[in-house]
Image (cartoon, rainbow, N blue to C red):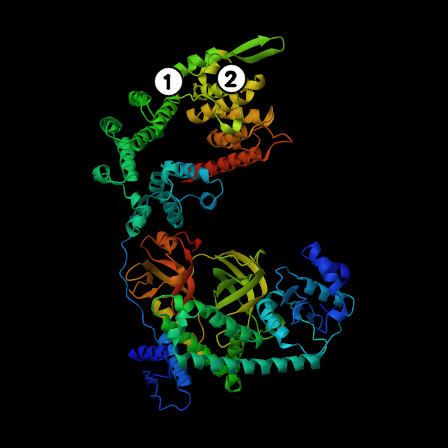
Amino acid sequence: MGERWDRARVIALAPDAPSLRAAQPLAARRSWPVTGAADGSALWGECRGSAAAPYRTVVDLSGPAYRCSCPSRKFPCKHALALLLLWSEGAIGPDGDLPDWAAGWLATRAARHADAKEPNDPKPPADPAAARRRAEQREARVAAGLAELDRWLCDQVRQGLAASQRSGYGHWDDIAARMVDAQAPGLAERLRALAAVPHSGPGWEGRLLEEYAMARLLVTAGRDQEKLSPPLRDTVRSRVGFTVRQGEVLAGATPVGDRWHVLARRDLDQDRIRTRRVWLRGRRTGRPALVLSFAAAGESLDGTLRVGTETEADLAFYPAAVPLRALVAARGDTGPGGTPPGSTVAGLLDGYAAALGQDPWLEAWPVVLDATPARAPRPCLVDAAGDAVPLHPAAGDCWRLFALSGGCPLAVAGEWSPRGLLPLTAWDEGGRPVRL
Amino acid sequence: MNTWHELVTASLIGTERAVVPAVAIPGLPPAGEAAGDPAAVLLDRAALLTAARRAGRRPDHAEPLPVAEPDPRPAVSPAAARRLTALLAGMHPDLLNEWLAVAAAHGLRPPPQLLPVLLDRARHAGAADPGLPRLVADAGGPRARWLAALNPDWSFVLADTADKAWRLGTAGQRRAYLTALRGRDPGAARKLIADSWAAADPQERLMFVNVMAESPGPADEPLLEAALDDEAAWVRKMAADVLAALPGSAVSRRMAERAVRWLRLEHGERGPRLVVVVSAECDAAMRRDGITPGPGHPAARLSDQAGLLLEIAARTPLRTWTREFGLTAAQIVALPAGDWGPPLFMGWSGAALRQGDGEWAAALINRALAGRPPVTVAELAVLPQLMRRADPLLGAPGVLSRPGPQAPPLLLNAMAALRFRYEMLKELADDHGNG
């Protein structure tokens, strides 16, 4: 990614001819009092325009992706194009310090994209000293962000949560944006999701308090990370938003070889990025694993791990107190998986409690339950012992699950969380998987 | 566990005004007086309690559901199940009814997980597709009835044989009752229609005719013939349509008499051709038999007389032509007819659809594919319908003529539909063979 692009490659990015025409006069040094480039992976600059404040433009060359403070809705806008043109002419040299406004956005992108896009063997950074300096800068920014979030959380509780129900989404978006600026995208995403809690029905106050309390626990843990065991520290850092490169994961712990049963799949669309979560379980080790893949809106997601199949594979787990997320390091033959063995409700709750003991922030816990769906007093799954767990409110009516069951027990795979079980796959009497 | 509740209350009010309650967790030493910001203390206690509550969760209790009656029918093959999924996702949606009817006829059941979407589809089918609820109920079997007992939206599945539905029900329930009665005892259904006719409003009379139209028989003719003099135009029109397609009906005989007067086969120098002898305008008797004066189809842009020819051809029993001309359907549709070609093509297409005549449908499709390309929008629009009614074997590879290079997209789409339908019916028949 270090090489400069030629002019033709930049011109090919223009969304239309007028954008390109408008960009050309701006591609002059005098329009750009501030510019910089990082390892040939990102460009930034401030463009003097007609407005009082300069427009701030950032280009992530790995996408490429663009961010500009101008009101244009074109991607890339004329400023981003002009910046790229300047760079292609060699007019932007590698420059030292990444400004905050560019760093925040790049870190968020890195967190979302890096895993999907990074090559498996990253080249060492061009300038180790600069890289170390940037890492130190980031640690300092995150620490300041954690302190700011701590004050914000305490303010909420001091003033009372009753006001939250009247707050718009902006209330959480503001603090989330500050966490983005502080290069803590994991926290930002957590906070942004909170805007929906006050409208999530009865009991929202309790759920909001839980979320604030667990966020403060994360802040406290992040502040005192030196006192934590290494796996727990990895968990805390990843939840704050530090990413681990794929290459480090693959080079890290010994991969786990097993016959992995693909139990369930869940696709999420967020901010024009599609995330696919695929849950696996090892036949021999019984270990759960989560494989993530990403795609831009409109692109198709990785379909190699098909629900219901079994694959002989080596998985490399990301370091964590409860290692779930993994990369497929090597794979062998694939075949149909049949109905997976399920646990009881008591087994599910015990397993989750044990996992919470390692990672108190754990929310999506993969389970396979042998149970029968029931409707009263609320939609739930009941096992042979008569123990029940509720279905997650977001699961909706679950009529497909009920229709498949017909009042008889079946194996259901899904994500367990404190609000209930989100059913994702069930197996029919012929052992065929049915996505729910 | 009221401690949690107290913590939530304090957090709602805010620690500016509320005291932070103490937290006791079984198995942990009681927390002492904490120093520092009360808000931070509250959050820390809440975090501790949250983790404890999540990890210490106990199972709920629930009331089990009754077990559904077993369905003795074998399930359709995975291929047929995938096709049903595609139909429900919007691919050739007008073939859904046929899939259900054929599956039920072969004694196969659809995959249970597709029943909810089928039931919802049937619930919203309305007047445009009145047969769907019955088809879904029959194909769904005991599992559909089990679901209907759980969800009142689907109660139409639980066939209501009590005549309460007839006396007090909504229009839909009355129709369902009448359809069910007609299935059990056609004579009783006819008597019920005859007895109710005088007091029924036009909507309901139209419903009576529609119910008869689903499976018309010779015994329905007196009721339908009487409906030709109904005061509501839609009832008259519908009754005429049903009678025209009813073999041996007086309307179809009268129509055949008109048809052979209007259309003749002549043997000229360049071989046989069709000649239209335009007779009078639309008289009262023609109107009574369902012929509308003026252009029959707005998109066809036909002259008045071409419109009349179309209407007559569409209502004439197709075997009239084969008998009169001594030719096969394929030979007849290939005869040159000059400017009368398009109205004849559309009229015959309408007749093939109404009379369910697969041979004529096939002849017309082949004519459109291989012969003079269809010109008008109306001609093209009738093709997809023909493709769906024609003998499904036409969709087998290599049976139909290949479309010409200028074949319009509608024609190609219609061919794709025919191929889809062929595959669909083959899958269900294979299942039957295996099952």
Q: Is residue A23 above or below residue B231?
A: below
Is B251 left, or right, of A180 in this rendering? left
Q: Which residue is mark 2?
A: B328
Kindly identify which numbered label has been placed on residue B54. Answer: none
Location of residue B220 (image quadrant) = top left
Secondary element under disc 1, as helix, strand or loop, is helix
**Coordinates of residue B387 in the picture (x, y in percent):** 50, 31
- Which one is in front, B52 or A355? B52
**Coordinates of residue B274 in the picture (x, y in percent):** 55, 14
- Name the amino acid, label 1: Val
Location of residue A115 (image quadrant) = bottom right
Q: Which residue is mark 1?
A: B251
Q: Quadrant of the C terminus of chain B?
A: top left
Work out how far the residue at label 2 is from the one at label 1, CA to CA, in angstroms: 24 Å
- Tell me what residue is drawn at x 35 percent, y 88 percent: B31
Secondary element under disc 2, as helix, strand or loop, is loop
- Tell me what residue is drawn at x 52 percent, y 79 percent: A231
Q: Residues within 10 Å of mark 1 (few under 14, many from 20)?
A: many
Please report, as a chain letter, where disc 1 is located.
Answer: B
Q: Quadrant of the N terminus of chain B?
A: bottom left
Location of residue A39 (image quadrant) = bottom right
Q: Is residue B70 above or below residue A49?
A: above
- Which one is in front, A75 or B419? A75
Q: Please indicate, yes or no, whether residue B281 appears anywhere in the rendered image.
A: yes
Is A54 left, or right, of A372 in this rendering? right
Q: Residues within 10 Å of mark 2 (few under 14, many from 20)?
A: some
**Coordinates of residue A48 in the picture (x, y in percent):** 70, 70
Please report, as a chain letter, where disc 2 is located.
Answer: B
Q: Is residue A35 above or below residue B139?
A: below
**Coordinates of residue A57 in the picture (x, y in percent):** 66, 69
- Which one is in front, A70 or A2? A70
